[in-house]
Image (tube, coloured by chain):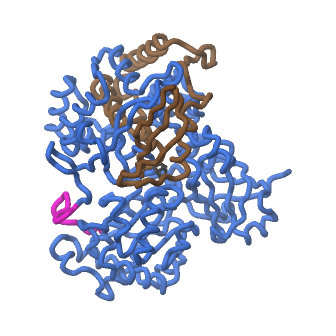
Amino acid sequence: MTNSISEIEDADCVFIIGSNTSSSHPLVATRIFRAKKKGARIIVADPRTIQISSLADITVRHKLGTDVALLNGIMHVIIQRGWHNVSFVEERTEGFEAFSKGIENYPPEKVAEITGVDAGDIVRMAEIYAKAETGSIVYCMGITQHTTGVDNVKALANLAMLTGNVGRESTGVNPLRGQNNVQGACDMGGLPNVYPGYQPVNMMDIQKKFEKAWNAALSDKVGRTVPQMLTGLTDGSVKALYIVGENPIQSDPDTHHVKKALAAAELLVVQDIFLTPTAEMAHVVLPGTSFAEKDGTFSNTERRVMRVRQAIDPVGDSRPDWQIIQEVSNRFGYGMDYSSPEAVMREIASLTPSYGGITYERLEGEGLQWPCPHADHPGTRFLHEGMFSRGKGLFHPIEYRPPAETVDEEFPYWLTTGRVFAHYHTATMTRNSPTLDAEIREGYLEVHPDDADRLGVLQGDAVTVTSRRGTITAKTAVTDRVQQGLVFMPFHFIESNANVLTNPAHDPVAQIPEFKVCAVKLEKAPL
Amino acid sequence: MDYRTVLTTCTYCGCGCNFYLEVLDGQVIDTIPCKTHPVNEGKLCIKGWNVHEFIQSPKRLKRPLIRRDGVLTEATWDEALDYTVSGLKAIKDAHGSDSIAFLTSAKVTNEENYLLQKFARAAVGTNSVDHCARL
Ligand code: SF4
C-alpha cells in the first residue's frame, strides 16, 4: 500500500475495486465503515454484489476483465469536464499528453457497451472520486489476477495521479496483500529477479555486494517464476522443487497440469505444517512449525514490520523453518550459523536499505513501516510525498484488452473465483479449526436465479462445472449477488477444487494467472 | 499451572492484526485482541478470534516423512535431511544449479524467507526462487 490502513478512515472518498474487503481483509473494511460514518463517499466496482456494496453511494457491476475500459471511461469524463488536478499533473508528472490522447477513445457511451455499466454511473463515479479532497483507492486480486493485471494497476495509478491523490495522507493506490506475509516474502527477495529490498540480481554492483556479504559466487541470470518452474518440470529442465509452506495443487490454476508437473519431479521436497495435497506428492516431507512456535517478523500490507513471538514449544518433533533451512544448508556444505531469528534480521538490515533501521528492539510496540533506512528513522506512513521514486510520476497510456478466454456457445458462463470470510486460501489451517469449519464446510457455486431456472436446479442441487481444463461438481447457491451469465466459486475446498477449472494464461509481465476469468458450461448433475 | 499471554501477529491475512495467545501449561487455549495496536485497535475478525484452534490440531505433521516403496513413511530428522541434501547435491552435479527451483512462502517469517533465498542463491547457485504473491 502507498498509504496506511488507519488513514483510510479519514478519506473523503474510498474507491473499492476488485476487493471483497469485508471478507478477505476484515480489519481494513472496519476502516471503510468508519470512513462512511465520518461522511466519506464510497464507490464500489465489482462483478458481484459484495457486502460492502450495501453501504456504497454508488456500486457498479462491470463485466469480468473490463477494468481498464471502466477506469479509462472514468478518466475520460474527468479530463473532459476539467475535474483533474492541473497543478499536480504539471508539477509532479510527465507523459500526460500521450496519455490523454489515448483516453479520448473511451467516451462513457462506448465504455458502457464494453463494461455493461450505465454511462450515467460512470459520470457519477468520476465526479465523486475526482471532486473528493482526499480519495483513496483500495484494490485486491480482482485487479491483479488477470492477463491484464499490470495494465489494471497502471490504469489505477493513472487515475490517482490525474486527480492528485498520491503522496498525501488518506489518498493513494492501496493494494491489499492477500497472505499475511506476502509483502515480507517479496521484500526478502522471494522473487526470481531481485535480492532482498528489490535489488536486481542482474546489476553488477548489487551482485558484488551480495557476493561479498555471502561469501559465494552468485548468478546474474534471472530465475524462473512459478509458471516457468512448472513448465520446466514438465519439459525436464527442472529436476528438483523445494516447496516451503505452499500448496500449489490447490492454489494454482489448472490443477491437472500442476499435478503432472509435480509428478515429473525427480525430487520434491515439501516443508509444511500439515500433510497438504501437495505434501502428499512429495518424496520427502519436513515438518515445520506454525507461527506460534517460533520467533520472527511478518510485514503486513501497509509495509509494517511486526514481531512474531514464540508461545509454545514446537508440536511433536517439528522444527522452526529457519532451523530446518539452516540445517539443510550446513549439510549441503554452505555454512549458516545463526543463533536466532534476531541474528538473521541483523544481516537483513545490513543488506536491505529499506530495512536498514529495523531491529527487534525498535519493533517493540507498533512495529515499523519501511522504508526505514537508518537507526533514527521513524518509518514511513505513506509513500511518494513530494516526489515519486523515479522523480516524476509517469502516465502510461493503457488500452483495453479482453480476457484470454471469453464465453462462447460451448462454454457460455463466466466463472470467477475468490475467498469466503471464514476460510483462508487453501484452508489448510482454517478447516482444521473446528469453529471456522462449522461456519462453512464445503464449496459452492453461486448462480443467478434465472440461470438456475434455465438449468432446472434449485438451491443446494449439485451441478457439474466444466471448463476447457477439467470438470468438478459443486452444490449451487442461488443468489442475485451474481449477475445472469456469471458464476462464482470459492477456491478453499479441495473436494470441489475451483482451480481444476481456472485458466493458467497469465499476465505477460507479472505472470499472474487469470484466476478471475474463465469460461465454463454448467449441467445439472445426475442424482 | 503455568499461564502466559504472548503478543504476536496474525498468521492469516495481510492486515497484520496483533493479539495475545493465551497459553496454559503449554496449550494455546485462546486469543485476546491487542487494544493498543494501530491496525486492529482491539478488534479481530472470525479467523483471528479462532486462530488458536489449528495450532495444536491432531493433524499437525509431527515427524519427517520419506517416500519408501511409494508410501510416505516416518523417518528421523537425520534421515530426512540427508535424503534431501543428497538428492539436491546429486541433481546439482548432474544437471546444474538451474535444474533446482524453490517455492518460498508468504506464510513463513521474513527471516525464513531470507534464509531460503540465500540458500538457493548462495549455496545452490540459482535465482529460481518464487512464491505465491501472484495467487
Ligand atoms: S484477525 Fe482477521 S483481519 Fe486481522 S490479520 Fe487475522 S485474518 Fe486478517
Q: Hue of chain A? A: blue
Residue A167 part of the magenta segment: no
* Percent of width and height locating residue A468: 63, 52
Judge left or right: residue B104 versus residue B111. Answer: right
Residue A387 part of the magenta segment: yes
Residue in view at x 21 percent, y 23 percent: A216
Q: How many numbered discs sit on the rendered protein?
A: 0
* Percent of width and height locating residue A63: 54, 70
Q: Main secondary structure of the magenta part?
A: loop
From this viewpoint, which residue is outermost toward the front?
B1
Residue in view at x 38 percent, y 58 percent: A175
Q: Hue of chain B? A: brown
Judge left or right: residue A470 versus residue A156. Answer: right
Between A136 and A192, which is closer to the camera in this rendering? A136
From this viewpoint, which residue is outermost toward the bottom?
A81
Does residue B135 lie above or below A311 as drawn?
A: below
Between A161 and A273, which is closer to the camera in this rendering? A273
Residue range corresponding to the magenta coloring: A384-396
From where the camera sits, is residue A236 visible? no
Judge left or right: residue A93 versus residue A303. Answer: left
From where the camera sits, is residue A287 visible? yes
Does residue A500 lie above or below A296 as drawn?
A: below
* Percent of width and height locating residue A133: 30, 78
